[in-house]
Amino acid sequence: MRLESRDSRPLALVILYPVISLFLAGLFCGFLVMLSGASPLSVFGLIAKGAAGSQFALFETLTRATPLIFTGLAAAVAFRAKLWNIGGEAQLYAGAVMTAVLGTGLLPLPSAVLIPLLIVMAMLAGALVLSVPTFLKTRFGVDEVVTTLLLNFIMILFVSMLLEGVLKDPSGMGWPQSKKVISEAVLPRLIEGKRLHFGFVIAVAAAFAVWVIDRKSALGYEMRAVGFNPKAANFAGIPVNRVLAKTALLSGGLAALAGFSEVAGLKGNLTLDLSPGFGYTGIVVAMLALLHPLGVVAAAIFVAAVFVGADAMSRSAGVPSYIAQVMVAASLLSMVTAVMLTRYRLRWR
Amino acid sequence: MPAVLRLSGITKRFGALLANDNISLSLGRGEIVGLLGENGAGKTTLMNILFGHYLADEGSIEVNGKPLAPGSPRDSLLAGIGMVHQHFTLADNLSVLDNIILGTEPFFSLSSDRRAARARIAKLGEDFGLAINPDAVVANLSVGERQRVEILKALYRDAKILILDEPTAVLTPQESTALFDTLRRFAERGLSIIFISHKLGEILAACSRVAVLRSGKLVAERDVAGATRNELAEIMVGRPVAPTKTELQTPGAVVLSLDGLSVRRGTQQLDGISLQLRGGQVIGVAGVSGNGQNLLADVISGLVQPHAGSMSMNGNRLGAVSPASAIANGVARIPEDRHAEGLIGDMSVTENVISEAYRTPRFSRRGLIDWAKARRFATQIIDDYAVKCPGPEAQVRLLSGGNMQKLILGRVMANAPSVVLANQPTRGLDVGAVNYVHEQLLAARRRGAAILLISEDLEELLSLSDEVCVMYRGQMSAPLSRADTTISELGLMMAGHGFEHREARHAS
């Protein structure tokens, strides 16, 4: 068995293969559900209902998708330039820390000034966190997979230190959490009484912005060129290291927005359980979206729906909600396989 | 003459491409058959089928009258087929002896009978005139010697049929002649040889019979005696071929001047290179590959900073160089490796042709690229240079080598460059594309550009260049006028004649 490169990629294949692959992933998960003694159809039905069956469910899914859009965009931007940023989690917390430091009363400004300022400062914090590994990569050739990954743990311990120290809420009954952000820093709810907040709008706008950068700007062109063939990019006079540095600023900034929007839009304060691995799940989202910025929005909503739906399903059907992890993982693997098969064909000898 | 090898009706398809179309060919004992064809004609596919790397869709192979199991390199080896690849498959850090016996020893044996192996290699070397020190480490051998090791390796495995894939690509003309003598000696001793090449002169010099492939079909099979170059060229290409001609032209002012350039990178070095390029003049650089030509190209391209010496453009001394500064100074750069450096295969034609100019006002404003303009530019190059591709949005990696080279030409010639640096611009191209590239270089010369042509193809150098320099171990000879130099003279210089041996200076 071997792989042969395809001469062309018919559009039909590019659409059909991912659809077939997601269907196969569904079949596989259905089989697992059967093993746990439930009916696959009813379980999938419950997941769909839990994710989108009511206004409440739908808004809950979109709320959960918001940070995933940001971290998914961060991964997509970096991966396009083959900057392997595994540190979305650290950059997310950097944005969250900045929001908690500046948004809890240090700057008594009106919303119209404070919120844009927080956005910019959070992005700078995330950009800074990713700049360090990127500098080590371009200057000394240090593998950024290792450094960005390890920075995640450093950052979480750093946040823990802050929450036990300077940022600790004096009226928090001893819990490791920061003070609540002041009301001027809170992102407005999109619909009164629901948890869905303005962060979702910012996330979708960010996806469009990244899409425009990617398609229209010289920077987007440079990032793609560097990602596809750094040697040829360098030969053509594209400043490879500078492009990687700019990529890091953008990617780190986007991941930090996830932290900002969770603190200012949803939780209200900085806690150690702010992110249940949004930074890592963002990588899955980006890969599912084939690194396309608008695809990231769809993929983030899909992944969020599976998680939210599976939570609801497990309460009523008794199948462990871990099935959500399996579903997302199976979808990812089959999606990646499908993409490979649009580029190569399998030959049995 | 009894046939030792018979290929019958070999057909191989890759998707829609018919790489081998019903090819039948036989090889007699003690015969040297040339397999001639352009790149992509199907020579390598046919040999890979013979050697078991590919599986033929149809057809069969017989060795000494016995059918050969398809798709098994091991069976091919056991049947006595030996292949000497264009790119050597030797382990650099092992000795000649180790390289030759590698893979022939029994797996479950703790000791190997090196004494017997040594004796056998000595005997083979004596019998076939391939003397070599079995204890030498391969890394220290010259390219010609490494090829000898490759051939010995095949003989050691009792090869009766030797396949040589473009064996002269890495040799000086003198080494090639020596190789042909060796091959004839093999044939006298009953070995049969398939000699793959796209160089007509070599086929005429080395072979007794020639088989010509064109677009996967065997279009001719004839004795070499009585054949002429032009006849073979026409059969190979399928139409009359007109050689490129250069007209006399008085050289203009000095455009680019290199003054004592020295730099070292890995095993390659430049050792005090001085050269003046004048407008309207082609200077050729000859040399066995790895003698500093690529380093020289990289310095002029702006990829490598010289450690010592300087470069001037139109009399102005250049400071630190970069690819961007080279482009800004009007240096058109045709890199040696189209795939690795010249183009970005996963991007479109449009994206590739603007890669050196996307930041200029021509294609972008305030950081946004004007894709409509870029597409028009791409369409114009496709039309002007007759690039065969579905359109400006086509992915470059799907184009043929010749069409890729046309894109690069279109990109770098767009701004009427004052210097053209062409590093192996026709390597791997078919005859039609080669002529096209030559014409473009000569057109640039007529416009008054200074052209530096680095090539390992001496015929190409002598047909295009006004003057030829030879590089040897990082040094460069004085330019020789084309009129009073010959291929054999260049060959001697490529082997180091006439160069000072001053390695000691760099021993630090």
Image (cartoon, coloured by chain):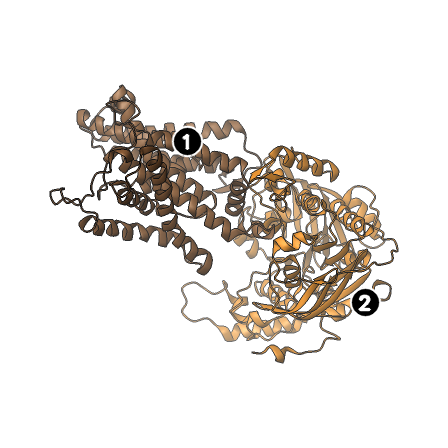
Q: How crowded is mark 2: few (under 14 residues within 10 Å), some or many (20 or more)?
A: some
Quarter of the image for residue B456 reads bottom right
Check the image and report above or below for B475 versus A258. Answer: below
Circle 2 SS class: strand
Query: In the image, residue A227 lies at what x, y percent?
Result: 50, 46
Query: In the image, residue B63 lies at what x, y percent?
Result: 62, 51
User: Which mark, by number, is residue B480?
Assistant: 2
Query: In the image, residue B118 lies at what x, y percent?
Result: 55, 74
Mark 1 — on which chain does it sit? A
Foreground residue among B440 and B144: B440
Please state if A4 lies on the left or on the right of A267 as rendered: right
Q: The orange chain is which one?
A: B
Nearer to us of marks 2 and 1 is 1
Residue ID for mark 1 = A205
> Which residue is at 36% across, 54% downward?
A146
Q: Name the residue at the bottom extreme.
A: B504
Q: Please, what is the three-letter code of the amino acid marked with disc 1? A: Ala
Check the image and report above or below for A246 versus B165. Answer: above
Q: Which chain is brown?
A: A
Foreground residue among B173 and B348: B348
> Which residue is at 80% across, 69% downward?
B489
Check the image and report above or below for B375 versus B272. Answer: above
User: Which mark, by number, is residue B284?
Assistant: none
Circle 1 SS class: helix
> Which residue is at 37% across, 33% downward?
A203
Q: Name the residue at the left extreme.
A: A173
Please state if A86 lies on the left or on the right of B128 as rendered: left
